[in-house]
Each structure stands twice: as C-alpha cells, then as structure tokens.
Image (tube, rainbow, N blue to C red):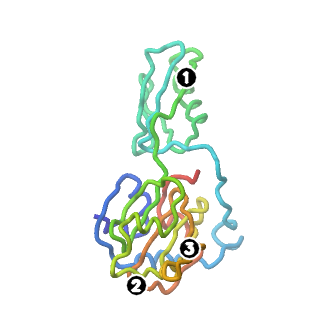
C-alpha cells in the first residue's frame, strides 16, 4: 500500500526500492511540505539561487547496481558485486568499500586503492552490468499510484494515464510536478490538466525527466510554493 508514500517527506527515497499500488490519502501532508517552501529563491534564502544540475553528467553508482570487476593479471580476483542498500560493496579479500555516489572512474580508483594493500600494481576494469533505470512517480488520486519506468518522451498527462487515470476524487486542475533542481532545492509546478484536456490543447503539457514526481491531490491546495528544500521531499537518484 502507498499510504506512507503520500507523506511527501521521504517519499522518493522509499519508492526507489518498491513499485506498489494502493489507496490515496488526504493531501494535507503535501500542503504542509509546500508550506516550508518559498515563492522565489535568491541569495538570502537557504543557499544560493538554484542552478540546474549539469545535464549529461557522469552516471553515479546507486544501491542495487551490479558491477563486474576484472583483474588483468590476477583473474582469481574477478568478481561480480551488487551495491548494498547502505552504499557498500564487499570485495574478495579486502572487505567493504563505500561506492554509492561515485562515478565509474572514481569507483575504479577506489577499488584499485583497496587492492593495492594486497596486490602489486593491480590493473582492474569495472563494468556497470546492471543499474537503476530512469523512472518517475505518480502519486495521489490516480488509479495505480506508484513508480514507473521512464521510456522515451513522457508528458505529465501521459504519466497520469499510465498510472490508471484520475479517480473521481481527483483535483485535476491542480496537478503538481515536483522536480529536483539541485541538492538544495526542488521546483514545484502547478499544472491545470483539467483545462488542457477539456480544451484539447496540450502545448503546455510538460515532458518528464528522470526522478520527477507527479502528485494529483484530492482537495484544492491553498498555497503552492515555487521552491521546496530538497531535503524535505526526500532523497533520490541524481539527474543525468
């Protein structure tokens, strides 16, 4: 059940490891989360003005990623490891190494450094065998709230349709799109899907990015802040 997911604080972090369905809850927790945001951000707010994380940056290792390690001169150390939920991998003969958040070059250096304690000049190749696929979340008053793979271009209205469409209790004139901008700030955009669908004008139907969350409330939300501190909405994988 997704009851716990509707408390926006921590929703994305919890949802990374599950894909559930369930009954929607009241939107009060969302309104409370928005109340901690700001209408605009400048240098006087909690940090500098938001700057979009650089697109096309290197992939960073996440929990449940599967890594294939190959040793050029000592094949007996070849191994396939999975990143544990705490961000560590367990290596033959050398133990645990923290790798979550590392790029592949950083991970390679960390593994090489660990093995330099027992091997002379180890030459190690690291391949990403399996990794977390891009995803988006649809929560609130939809038929099948949960986590969905992001395959190609998907708009907010298409995301709602994939999640089973609106319920009879949905306030689809106030659909919220949460998008992490950087480690400090998450943007919140209110989208009037009711008007767009009735007018058959989807020119303003936003395309989703990896990690986006669409929330369909049950009641009208009195205040929608433009920016919400990222720590209040949970932690999720970095934007590519």
Residue located beneath label 3 in the image: 202
CA distance separating discs 2 and 3: 23 Å
> Residue at the spot x=44%, y=71% of the render?
215
Measured as percent of width and height from the top left, residue 174 is found at: 48, 80
Q: Is residue 89 above or below residue 235?
A: above
- Of 91 and 130, which appears nearest the observer? 130
Neighbor class of circle 2 (other Cα within 10 Å; few <14, some 14-19, many 20+) is some
> Which label number is shown at residue 124?
1
Residue extending farthest to the front is: 200
Neighbor class of circle 1 (other Cα within 10 Å; few <14, some 14-19, many 20+) is some
Q: Is residue 100 left or right of residue 145?
A: right
> Residue at the spot x=53%, y=82% of the render?
199
Residue extending farthest to the top is: 73
Q: Earlier in the sequence, mark 2 or mark 3?
A: 3
SS for callout 2: loop
Measured as percent of width and height from the top left, residue 19 is found at: 34, 56
Please report contact status of discs 3 and 1: CB closer than 8 Å, yes or no: no
SS for callout 3: loop
Camera-near label (2 vs 3) is: 3
Residue located beneath label 2 in the image: 219
């Amino acid at each position: 059940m997704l009851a716990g997911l509707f408390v926006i604080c921590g929703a994305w972090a919890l949802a990374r490891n599950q894909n559930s369905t369930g009954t929607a809850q009241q939107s009060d927790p969302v309104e409370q989360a928005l109340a901690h945001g700001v209408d605009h951000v400048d240098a006087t707010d909690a940090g500098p003005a938001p700057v979009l994380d650089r697109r096309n940056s290197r992939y960073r290792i996440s929990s449940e990623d599967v890594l294939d390690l190959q040793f050029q001169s000592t094949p007996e150390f070849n191994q396939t490891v999975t990143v544990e939920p705490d961000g560590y991998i367990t290596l033959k003969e050398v133990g645990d190494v923290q790798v979550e958040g590392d790029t592949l070059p950083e991970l390679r250096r960390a593994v090489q450094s660990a093995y330099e304690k027992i091997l002379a000049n180890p030459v190690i190749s690291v391949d990403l065998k399996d990794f977390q696929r891009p995803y988006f979340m649809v929560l609130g008053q939809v038929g099948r709230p949960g986590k969905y793979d992001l395959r190609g271009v998907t708009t907010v209205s298409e995301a709602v349709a994939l999640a089973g469409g609106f319920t009879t209790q949905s306030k689809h004139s106030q659909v919220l799109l949460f998008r992490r901008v950087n480690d400090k700030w998450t943007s919140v955009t209110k989208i009037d899907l009711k008007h767009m669908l009735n007018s058959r004008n989807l020119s303003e139907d936003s395309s989703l990015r990896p990690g986006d969350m669409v929330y369909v409330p049950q009641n009208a939300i009195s205040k929608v802040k433009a920016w919400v501190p990222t720590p209040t909405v949970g932690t999720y994988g970095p934007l590519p």
